[in-house]
């Protein structure tokens, strides 16, 4: 009897050890990262880059990235909310999702998630196909004023960063933001296909999504939304092009609701170690991403403030009623 009791105790101890004493994010456990958009876009790239950085820190950890497309990430958001208490799941999100929640009148909001960390910021870039007649932002503005409907703008989700950027640029140019012809996609990959197929007049996305194609000559950059020229992009700022617009997209991680304190701490610590890795630092430099790491309550407070700010912007632009 005593031998059986000892055996049971050892089995329980081993089980607890395997799952971190009740937490779900130990060094040897698996981790799933949801990219709530199509492959090829910013959330997908961030998710897969982070996955590589996670395994660089801990080669034993299995990291899986999967895509859930649609509605500016709000379909994925709803799925995440249904994973209550799952300490082995992260979802990549950001400014795009904040706007999409308002635009799509999503019943599930970011209040039904556990904020983990803000990771990066990235400025937007305005590009045209190589054969485009638009050689500068001045050419774009002239066409916009002549007939906004004839200038098709390829970008990410409706109400997201790309859409907001287009609206702010139109407003700065004296064009009604409600009149612009914005063609939303599930990610930067959709916009890229339209541009390379010469089926869109201009494209707006994060610098990292179009920079390679600008360097190859397939696309031409008209401007970037940074306060000063970027070292890795041969383009003026949008302000230098005559439009008083400056905006940066940001991305981060949230987890399902209802996490235990132990799982929340374990996830935050795991993401912090990933952020501190050389692999992640190299990825920031390669992609032109700005390190803007915030975790825990600092990120939760930032997220609350962003929701208020973005709702005000898109309401003013007439993107939501």
Image (spheres, rainbow, N blue to C red):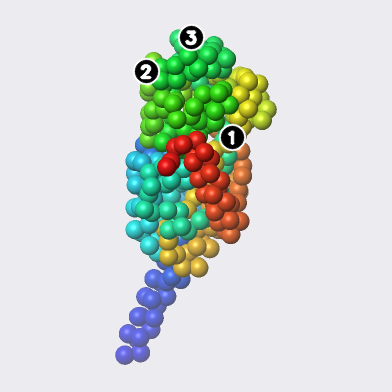
Residue 65 x/y as whole percent = 39, 45
Is 69 placed above or below 200 here? below
Neighbor class of circle 1 (other Cα within 10 Å; few <14, some 14-19, many 20+) is some
Residue 271 rendering spot, x and y as whole percentages: 53, 53
Image point (46%, 36%), residue name: 318
Task: Report the residue at 31% width, 90% height from top.
Answer: 1
Does residue 271 sit above or below 97 in this rendering? Answer: below
Tag of residue 133: 3
User: Label 1 to label 2, Cα distance in Å?
Assistant: 26 Å
The residue that label 1 is drawn on is 247
Q: Toward the viewer: 272 or 16?
A: 272
Upstream in the sequence, badge 1 or badge 2? 2
Q: Earlier in the sequence, mark 1 or mark 3?
A: 3
Q: Position of residue 20 (x, y in %)?
A: 46, 67
Viewer-side residue, 137 vs 312: 312
For the residues labelled 1 and 3, say whether their Cβ atoms are less than 8 Å apart.
no
Q: Is residue 311 above or below residue 39?
A: below
Residue 180 locus on image (x, y percent) = 44, 25
Q: Residue furthest right?
A: 228
Q: Which mark is residue 199?
A: 2
Q: Is residue 214 visible?
A: no
Q: Is residue 209 left or right of residue 275?
A: left
């Amino acid at each position: 009897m005593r031998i059986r009791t000892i055996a049971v105790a050892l089995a329980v101890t081993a089980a607890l050890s395997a799952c971190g004493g009740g937490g779900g994010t130990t060094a040897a456990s698996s981790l799933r990262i949801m990219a709530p958009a199509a492959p090829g876009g910013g959330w997908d790239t961030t998710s897969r880059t982070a996955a590589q950085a996670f395994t660089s820190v801990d080669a034993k950890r299995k990291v899986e990235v999967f895509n859930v497309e649609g509605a500016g990430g709000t379909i994925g958001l709803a799925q995440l909310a249904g994973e209550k208490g799952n300490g082995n799941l992260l979802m990549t999100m950001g400014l795009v999702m904040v706007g999409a929640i308002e635009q799509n009148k999503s019943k599930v909001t970011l209040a039904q998630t556990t904020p983990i960390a803000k990771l990066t910021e990235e400025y937007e870039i305005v590009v045209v196909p190589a054969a485009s007649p638009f050689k500068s932002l001045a050419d774009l503005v002239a066409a916009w004023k002549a007939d906004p409907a004839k200038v098709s703008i390829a970008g990410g989700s409706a109400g997201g960063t790309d859409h907001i950027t287009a609206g702010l640029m139109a407003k700065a140019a004296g064009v009604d933001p409600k009149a612009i012809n914005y063609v939303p996609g599930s990610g930067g990959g959709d916009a890229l296909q339209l541009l390379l197929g010469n089926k869109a007049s201009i494209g707006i996305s994060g610098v990292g999504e179009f920079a390679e194609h600008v360097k190859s000559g397939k696309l031409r950059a008209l401007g970037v939304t940074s306060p000063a020229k970027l070292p890795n992009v041969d383009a003026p700022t949008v302000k230098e092009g005559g439009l008083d617009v400056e905006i940066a997209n940001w991305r981060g991680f949230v987890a399902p609701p209802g996490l235990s304190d132990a799982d929340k701490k374990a996830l935050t610590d795991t993401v912090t170690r990933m952020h501190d890795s050389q692999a992640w630092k190299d990825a920031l430099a390669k992609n032109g991403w700005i390190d803007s790491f915030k975790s825990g309550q600092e990120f939760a407070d930032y997220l609350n403030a962003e929701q208020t700010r973005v709702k005000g912007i898109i309401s003013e632009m007439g993107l939501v009623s």
